[in-house]
Structures are given as C-alpha cells and as structure tokens.
Amino acid sequence: MRGESEDELNDQGYAVLEKVSNTFVQALRSFCESAEGLLKEDGQVNDDLLSLYFSCLRFLRTNEQIDEDYAFYLLNSGKDLKVKLFCINPSSRLEAGFKKMDSTICFSATMKPQEYFDRLLGLDEEAKWYQLPSPFNPENLGVFVASYIGTSFKERSSSLDDLVELIRQVTLSNPGNYLVFFPSHAYLQAAFEAFGAAWPDQLIISQRRMMTEQDRQDFLEHFQTKSHVVGFAVMGGVFGEGIDLRGKRLVGVVVAGVGLPQLGVERELIRQYFGGERTGFEFAYQYPGMSRVLQTAGRVIRDAGDKGIICLVDRRFGESRYRRLFPAEWKIQQALSIDALSNSVGDFWLSHFSH
C-alpha cells in the first residue's frame, strides 16, 4: 500500500513503488538486446526465451506510458519475485481509442450498474445506453433467494450443513442436472465432501484445479449423458461462462455467495485508487463479484423452450445494494427457511408441469 513503511509492505508480501527504477529499466533493455541477438543467431527458437523476451518488451513499452492510473508492484510468491505494471483504471486509454472511431458499441449481458461502466470505460455524457428486454419468457425462470444462510468467510463452517441440505432439496425438486457454484476452490471442496458424505447415492462431480482440456470435456459430458448429476464448480471459472447446456441437460443453478473476489494486491490497489470506503469496495469487489454471479446464473436459460431455476444463497442477496444489480426481468422470491424454499421451488415446477 502506498505510503506504508517497507517493513509493513514486506509483511504483506508485496510492495508498491512510486516508479520503475532506471537501473531496472536499463537491465531489461540490455537483456532484450542480448536475447534478440541470440534469437537471430540460433537456428531453433527457444520458446521460453522468446516468451520472456516479448514480456520484457511489453513491460518497457508500457512503462513509457504510465501515469497515475498505473501501479508498479513487487509480489513475493514463494521462491519467485513477481514484477508487474498494473493498469488500475483503463478509462483514459479506452476513451482515447474511442475518439479515433466514428462510433463504438459496447455490449454485454452483465453491464450493471451504469455508473461503474461509465467510469471504467471512459464514457462521456453523450454515450447512449440501451437495455434490451430478454428474448426469453421470464415465466420460465424461477429465481429464489435463500437469505437465511450466510456464506461469508466467517460463516461458512457453521452454515455448511444448511447449505448441503439446501442443495439436496433444490436438486430433488425436479429431475434434471444441476450446477452449484462457489467463490473459491476451498469452499467448493468443503461442500463437495460434505454433500458426498451426507448423500452417497447421488452422482456428483467436481471442478478441480488445473484441469486439462480433456478433463473439462469429461466434466461436461456428464451433462450430455446423465439425467440427474450435480456438478460443483467455481464462479468465474471455465464452467461459469460460455457453456451451453439446453433443456434437461441443465435445469438449475445454485450460487453460494455474492462472488466477491479474493483479497489480493490488485483488488486492494483498485479499492484504494477509487477511494471512499463504499466506492472503493464496490469497484474492487462488489461489482466484479456480481458480474460473476450473473454470468453463472445465465447458464440456466439458453433457449426459448428452456425452463429452470436459480437459487442465490446468501443473506446479502436480500439487500437493496445487491438487488438493484439483478436483471429487470427477474421475479425474485425470497425464502427465510428451508421449508419455505422447498415449497416455493416445488410450486414453480408444479406450475410448469401442469401446462
């Protein structure tokens, strides 16, 4: 953190410096010159050397343009020391790029709140915002908030049994496949093991760290070939966006937590930069977290004929600061107990079975 002593910074595992030293810049330039000579002389390309060469070139070029929107930090990661130029606020660069264009269209399914994207994208008052209605029938989606369970880091152990029971009740409510998303691998693993111990007859699969492409394909294959599988995955990961499981392949998603990114040097740099206890937290943690939640929830309805449910698990989802970020077409039902949730989810499916 800027302004703290070197000892304090070292205790935290990182140090933010005011600028890149000339000595370091000269060392990088010397390396690039030497590497370029070796790469020209060597008949065979050394991939590791080539990758490092281009990384150093990018660092040097970026360093020529840095201003108060950038931070230069050192991070102690085990036996290695990471050196990085981090762009905290890209708005001025994006704004300059937009001005070179006749027009620019920025679009996403998760662009809320407007003031957040206005500021990060460098949009001025002349920028036009359009919110298009969902092409899908909102009656085909049930959205439930289980506000009786807390999933903050301090509450996870004490609420784990309640979460496992919720997952069981939701996934029994209607035949089909389900995905349960967590903000971290550690939380996922704890829930996966607890659920497996409580319900050993239920087929469950889990996302793992460092999965290969074949591992990912095998995970998704369960949703193509099985009729009742419960998958455990991480928000913001490979299964949280971009997958397309239609019909009975995926009929429901459970989201455990509000998706806050883990504490880290870059998150803290963003929080400090945008200042103010509320705005800094929103820009660094809340808004990126909710973007992950909404991307995850978007796995359910992928086609006009799809019907499914989203269960958001955390009392914070019942607060106005989070609810204002929900899509306008969502019809939220809040549950204050497992019985209330089971009844509401059951009623949703019953209403669709009867049609």
Image (cartoon, rainbow, N blue to C red):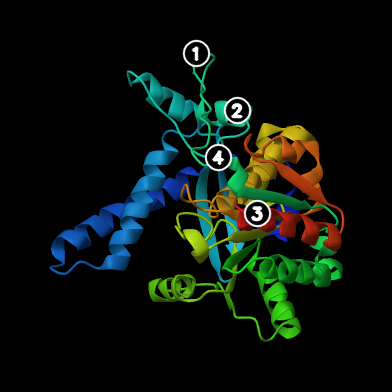
Q: Residues within 10 Å of mark 4 (few under 14, many from 20)?
A: some
Task: Choose between 165 and 207: the one closer to the eye.
Answer: 165
Q: Tag 1: residue type?
A: Glu
Rendered location of residue 126, percent (x, y): 50, 13
**Residue at left 38%, top 26%?**
97
Considering only order in the chain, which callout, 3 or 4, is on the residue closer to the N terminus? Answer: 4
Considering only order in the chain, which callout, 1 or 2, is on the residue closer to the N terminus? Answer: 2
Q: Tag 2: residue type?
A: Gln
* Quarter residue 212 falls in: bottom left
CA gap between label 4 and label 3 equals: 16 Å
Nearer the viewer's eye, disc 1 or disc 3? 3
Residue 18 in the figure: left or right of residue 157: left
Rendered location of residue 53, percent (x, y): 32, 56
Residue 40 in the figure: left or right of residue 250: left
Residue carrying label 2: 114
Residue 310's label in the rendered image is 3
Rendered location of residue 336, percent (x, y): 87, 54
Considering only order in the chain, which callout, 2 or 3, is on the residue closer to the N terminus? Answer: 2
Residue carrying label 1: 126
Residue carrying label 4: 110
CA gap between label 1 and label 4 equals: 21 Å
